Amino acid sequence: MSTLKITNLSARIGSRQILNGVSLEVSSGEVHALMGPNGSGKSTLSHVLMGHPDYEVTGGSVTLDGEELLGLPTHERAVRGLFLAMQYPVEVPGVGLDTMRRAALEARGVEPNGLSKELAREAELVGLAPSALGRPVNVAFSGGEKKRNETVQLAVLRPRIAVIDEIDSGLDIDALREVARRIEQMTQESAEGGDRLGVLAITHYARLLTELRPDRIHVLRDGRVVMSGGPELADQLEESGYEGLGVTDGTGEVDVRQQ
Ligand code: ADP
Ligand code: MG
């Protein structure tokens, strides 16, 4: 079993402090949803976890199975089993999807045998046209294609812990269901010889969480977790909004317990 442990993580970009002591723990087979108002630092957290060079960590630690990740370059974090599906996936002109995936698997010491077949199968599961697999990564993809592609990548790479940042944005309801279902499946069934996937899902909408069923919901505000609760918290937030639930500033920590 794998555990991603974030302890008191603080980070800034330039002179601007954005994360102010985030603590979270995600283990294999678990889904944790991270919600929170725009600008609360959700994407920043995902970038800092993956080691984006623009952000400076000012405190705390991030371990995967006890090993400190902070200080490791991004590709080393990926090799150890951390994966990020970006809110805004990057276009990589000139590099085909299959080439990128083959390189990623080889970097992890996995023989990419049967990769083309697996890619085709995964693409079909989330409704990505087979022709997209032969194109350069994300170039001229629609918003929905990018998100489907992130899911295909996740399924083929089989990381231990995946951070998915607003995978629901740009997807219509049917596509959202397919994508969420596929990710949920990975948290239920172990990959060959491995563990079930652990997921930190950043989202604004409870709708994602009807298929991708969370164990815990956390609310980020001003760069810290101000509220945590069971799955019912997502519905309460959808109904009342953040203000309605008292998420007005980052000063008080509220623990909403499961009824
Ligand atoms: P969320 O994903 O929760 O909407 P972000 O993590 O994207 O929030 O942003 C958190 C805050 O950090 C915002 O106020 C945003 O303007 C600021 N921020 C994010 N990236 C940068 C950047 N590259 N330069 C300056 N400020 C940034
Ligand atoms: Mg964001």
Image (cartoon, rainbow, N blue to C red):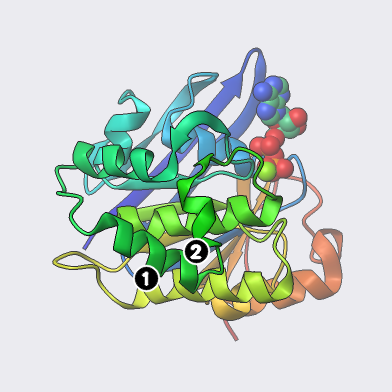
Kindly identify which residue carries mark 2: 32
Q: Residue at x 37, y 45 (%)?
A: 98
Q: Residue at x 33, y 24 (%)?
A: 73
| Marks 1/2: CA–CA distance | 14 Å
| Residue 138 locus on image (x, y percent) | 57, 41
Q: Residue at x 69, y 50 (%)?
A: 142
| Residue 144 locus on image (x, y percent) | 67, 57
Mark 2 Cα shell of 10 Å, populated few (<14), some (14-19), many (≥20): many
Q: Quadrant of ligand 2?
A: top right
Figure quadrant of residue 54: top right
Q: Secondary structure at mark 1?
A: helix
Mark on residue 186? 1
Residue type, label 1? Met
| Residue 61 locus on image (x, y percent) | 37, 35
Quadrant of the snapshot with the C terminus = bottom right
Residue type, label 2? His
Quadrant of the snapshot with the N terminus = bottom left
